[in-house]
């Protein structure tokens, strides 16, 4: 492969880009220098694409930050220094960043400052489907939303100019189908920004103490007014009025983002695109009041097509009320489209047909349906998390107790499924230790309370909760599953590996040092290789029985990362087989351990290890109680 | 170039090369001057879970999702995944099904039945008469690497002459996306796929 096509610098080149690559390209074209973020599906590829651009554009200063709040602050520091800066995260990451974001909205931007939020309708890879357009409304910050990869590139490029013109932070809202869909994109010029960079020592602006903030608040309101006025001329808001009627009615649609694209498909499908009025919003907040009023005066009824909350719908209804039109114009939205999940393409067809009084017949369903058991995501063959949870279960069995396993966000969350079924809580990043703090106050005399989280999650927000446990003497066992990678989101490095996003060497942060530094006593710290099952069980039992705040670091490199390392170093992983003579067909390795490389031959009633998927982690050798699994000596 | 829209769905299991296949097709569609959209499964769902990716191209495509009953072609790199996605097919849809079933490991634990190849075929034939079971698994191994399965299946599609993209363009796109070391293997897989596709072409109704 030659130079990646998002790097090609010839303006006018026609290429295919993933939505996130298109966003990264727009960031590059805007002359941005600082980029920060924390990995999170569906946002991760934006920053990793910038990292791939870095060898060709060394002016880029990009990093994976420790969490979204720090990432926001890194970018905002860039904006304070007159540099165009971007920060990227998934929707729930904005909750973490919101402390900085809400007040940065007051002080505003100096160098162009854009926060990219990747929302996830249908929770494809998330714990909720919150609608982050409300963060714009909440912070009084404009919200941009693109519908296609091309528009994503153009709109984010424009967002930096806009940010500087109005001295405002811009919230750039995307959803999974935009982030993870490809489209044809025409590349643009890469802007050369010629200006002096550096901090400006404007204390009345950057020191947000009460006397300053009251003034900043007035400026914020003034700014919002100016932006509201400009919204009518915003180059990515389009109003197309049709004088035609459909079945006697003048019909209007209002939409934005991915729903707009599918709405267009539906209107094309029925051949009625030119028979209806359409308002397409590239900036969903603040609303273009003049355009909306013009639409109101041109139609009899409006359907707002938006996923998740009735954000645009409520704005329209408010304007209709203010204009005294609430009796004259019908505004529909969530009475027709659902408030949850992602809209399927046929849902647009059904609802649009219904709204304009046309026929749409779905496809008939065959008579004899096959019930398909789900194919759920699973821990990979050789995954060290499987070994850790198996050890936890063995200790529970041995001590005849049930732990409260307060867990966290990462691949290990998959241990909630069969056969491990060993997590009890998963809510938010770093929450495992926080919840355990509280539960231990009640459970401390009964079931042991475990907080289980990964290395990256520990760095992200586990540390304050650990210090909290030490300080307040909340009796918990924290288990850090250190697989030396942020695997679920694409194997990003983190402080534990010391490698930076650019693959350059950074400074490594040692988890043991951190834990001791948080005040955990050295005798309450255990470290073991996750794949040494017998030692894991022995040490974990001691850790469970000990008093005070305890930390157990279960460490083994992510099996997918390790497989690549082996390949690069030409190391052949061990070959592990089942001796059919010794195998009793007890199914422990299949039904309790559940490595996908171990399958059961129903005819022979014996376990078999699939050699093409086995990673040679050897944990199943210790899982087998009949000594039937062995390593083949080379 | 008068094509309004062509919809194609590739399904399989995370790691089988669904996204690469979509990427190859998307680039080829661009080279043939179409407007292109894809929607892909990334992230958590990829850990051995079901994966489905949409490709749409033509002069009238805006959004990436395909409405039910509107996919002209469905390629399944794992046979049973075609059943999971049957609603995208109608009576004209061409199903190209790799002959391999991979039973999800959890099925055993849940004491559930999983369909075999025969029942997958019978089920799909209720929907369309153009269901083709392809010897993809063996052919990819024969070409030299199971990872050439996706390119083999693209070859079958090209041979069937049901893809409105030029063979030459697709070859260029494959060269662009396949790693240098795997070029020869994929070239063989693609050619063998085309030969198989030519046979299928005669059978399409």
Image (cartoon, coloured by chain):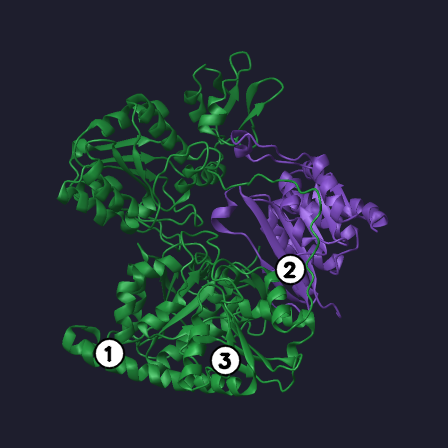
Q: Colour of chain A?
A: green
Q: Secondary structure at mark 3?
A: loop
Question: What crowding class fits label 2: few (fewer than 14 Cα within 10 Å), some (14-19), or many (20 or more)?
Answer: many
Relative depth, front residue between A115 and A407: A407
Query: Which residue position is annotated with label 2?
Result: B67
Protein chain holding label 1: A
Residue A183 is situated, as x and y percent measured from the top left of the image, at: 58, 65
Residue A434 is situated, as x and y percent measured from the top left of the image, at: 25, 46
Q: Earlier in the sequence, mark 3 or mark 1?
A: 1
Alpha carbons under labels 2 and 1: distance apart: 47 Å
Alpha carbons under labels 3 and 1: distance apart: 27 Å
Q: Secondary structure at mark 1?
A: helix
Q: Is residue A631 left or right of residue B194?
A: left
Splitting the image into 4 quarters, where does residue A289 fall?
bottom left
Query: Which residue position is annotated with label 1?
Result: A217
User: What mark, if any, has residue A254 been given in the picture?
Assistant: none
Relative depth, front residue between A178 and A256: A256
Query: Which residue position is annotated with label 3?
Result: A237
Protein chain holding label 2: B
State whether residue A430 appears in this view.
yes
Q: Secondary structure at mark 2?
A: loop
Residue A120 is situated, as x and y percent measured from the top left of the image, at: 46, 58
Protein chain holding label 3: A
Badge nearest the viewer, 2 or 1: 2
Residue A296 is situated, as x and y percent measured from the top left of the image, at: 51, 84
- Same chain for mark 2 and mark 3? The answer is no
Height in image: A634 above or below B4? Answer: above
State the residue at coordinates (42%, 45%): A487
Splitting the image into 4 quarters, where does residue A607 fall?
top right
- Callouts 2 and 3 close, C-beta under 8 Å: no
Q: Colour of chain B?
A: purple
- Same chain for mark 2 and mark 1? The answer is no
């Amino acid at each position: 492969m030659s130079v990646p096509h998002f790097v090609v610098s010839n303006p006018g080149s026609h290429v295919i880009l993933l939505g996130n690559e298109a966003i990264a390209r727009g960031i590059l074209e805007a002359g941005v220098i600082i980029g920060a973020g924390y990995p999170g599906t569906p946002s991760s590829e934006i920053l990793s694409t910038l990292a791939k651009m870095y060898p060709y554009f060394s002016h880029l200063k990009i990093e994976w930050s420790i969490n979204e709040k720090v990432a926001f602050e890194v970018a905002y520091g860039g904006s304070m220094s007159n540099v165009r800066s971007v920060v990227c995260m998934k929707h729930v990451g904005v909750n973490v960043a919101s402390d900085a974001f809400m007040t940065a909205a007051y002080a505003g931007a100096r160098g162009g400052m854009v926060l990219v939020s990747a929302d996830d309708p249908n929770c494809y890879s998330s714990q909720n489907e919150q609608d982050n357009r409300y963060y714009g409304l909440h912070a009084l910050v404009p919200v941009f939303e693109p519908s296609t990869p091309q528009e994503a590139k153009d709109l984010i490029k424009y967002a930096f100019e806009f940010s500087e013109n109005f001295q405002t932070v811009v919230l750039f809202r995307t959803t999974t189908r935009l982030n993870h869909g490809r489209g044809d994109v025409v590349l643009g010029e890469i802007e050369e920004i010629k200006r002096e960079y550096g901090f400006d020592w404007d204390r009345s602006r950057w020191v947000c103490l009460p006397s300053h903030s009251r003034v900043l608040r007035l400026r914020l309101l003034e700014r919002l007014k100016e932006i509201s006025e400009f919204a009518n001329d915003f180059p990515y808001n389009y109003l197309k009025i049709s004088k035609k009627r459909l079945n006697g009615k003048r019909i209007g649609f209002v939409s934005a983002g991915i729903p707009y694209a599918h709405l267009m498909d539906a209107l094309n499908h029925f051949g009625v695109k030119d028979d209806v009025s359409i308002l397409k919003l590239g900036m969903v907040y603040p609303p273009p009041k003049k355009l909306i009023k013009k639409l109101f005066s041109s139609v009899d009824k409006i359907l707002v097509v938006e996923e998740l909350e009735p954000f645009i719908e409520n704005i329209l209804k408010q304007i209709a009320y203010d204009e005294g039109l609430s009796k004259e114009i019908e505004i529909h939205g969530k009475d027709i489209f659902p408030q949850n999940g992602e809209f399927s393409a046929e849902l647009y067809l059904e609802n649009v047909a219904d709204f304009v009084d046309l026929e749409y017949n779905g496809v008939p369903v065959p008579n004899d349906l096959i019930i398909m058991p789900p194919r759920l995501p699973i821990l990979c063959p050789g995954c060290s998390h499987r070994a850790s949870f198996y050890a936890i279960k063995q200790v529970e069995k041995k001590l005849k107790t049930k732990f409260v396993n307060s867990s966290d966000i990462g691949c290990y969350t998959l241990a909630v499924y069969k056969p491990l079924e060993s997590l009890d809580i998963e809510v938010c990043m770093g929450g495992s230790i926080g919840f355990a703090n509280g539960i231990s106050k009640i459970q401390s005399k009964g079931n042991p309370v475990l907080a289980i989280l990964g290395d990256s999650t520990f760095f992200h927000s586990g540390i304050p909760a650990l210090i909290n446990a030490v300080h307040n003497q909340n009796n918990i066992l924290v288990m850090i599953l250190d697989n030396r990678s942020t695997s679920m989101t694409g194997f990003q490095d983190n402080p534990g590996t010391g490698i930076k996003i650019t693959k350059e060497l950074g400074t490594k942060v040692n988890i043991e040092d951190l834990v001791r530094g948080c005040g955990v006593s050295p005798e309450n710290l255990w470290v073991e290789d996750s794949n040494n099952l017998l030692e894991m069980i022995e040490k974990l039992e001691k850790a469970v029985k000990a008093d005070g705040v305890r930390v157990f670091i279960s460490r083994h490199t992510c099996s997918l990362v390790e497989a690549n390392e082996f390949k690069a170093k030409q190391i052949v992983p061990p070959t592990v087989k089942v001796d059919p003579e010794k195998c009793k067909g007890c199914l422990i390795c299949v039904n309790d351990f559940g490595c996908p490389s171990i399958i059961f031959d129903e005819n022979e009633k014996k376990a078999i290890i699939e050699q093409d998927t086995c990673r040679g982690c050897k944990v199943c050798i210790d899982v087998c109680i009949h000594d039937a699994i062995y390593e083949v000596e080379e | 170039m008068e094509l309004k829209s062509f919809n194609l769905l590739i399904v399989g299991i995370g790691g089988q090369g669904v996204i690469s296949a979509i990427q190859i097709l998307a680039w080829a569609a661009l080279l043939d001057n179409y407007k292109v959209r894809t929607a892909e499964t990334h992230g958590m769902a990829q850990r051995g879970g079901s994966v489905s990716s949409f490709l749409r191209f033509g002069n009238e495509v805006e959004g990436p999702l395909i409405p039910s009953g509107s996919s002209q072609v469905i390629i399944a790199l794992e046979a049973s995944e075609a059943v999971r996605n049957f609603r995208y097919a109608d009576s004209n849809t061409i199903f190209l099904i790799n002959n391999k079933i991979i039973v999800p490991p959890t099925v055993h634990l849940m004491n559930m039945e999983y369909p075999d190849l025969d029942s997958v075929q019978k089920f799909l034939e209720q929907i369309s008469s153009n269901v083709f079971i392809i010897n993809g698994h063996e052919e990819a191994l024969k070409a030299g690497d199971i990872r050439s399965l996706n390119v083999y299946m693209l070859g079958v599609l090209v041979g069937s002459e049901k893809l409105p993209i030029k063979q030459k363009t697709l070859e260029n796109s494959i060269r662009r996306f396949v790693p240098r070391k795997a070029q020869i293997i994929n070239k063989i897989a693609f050619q063998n796929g085309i030969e198989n596709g030519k046979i299928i072409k005669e059978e399409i109704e």
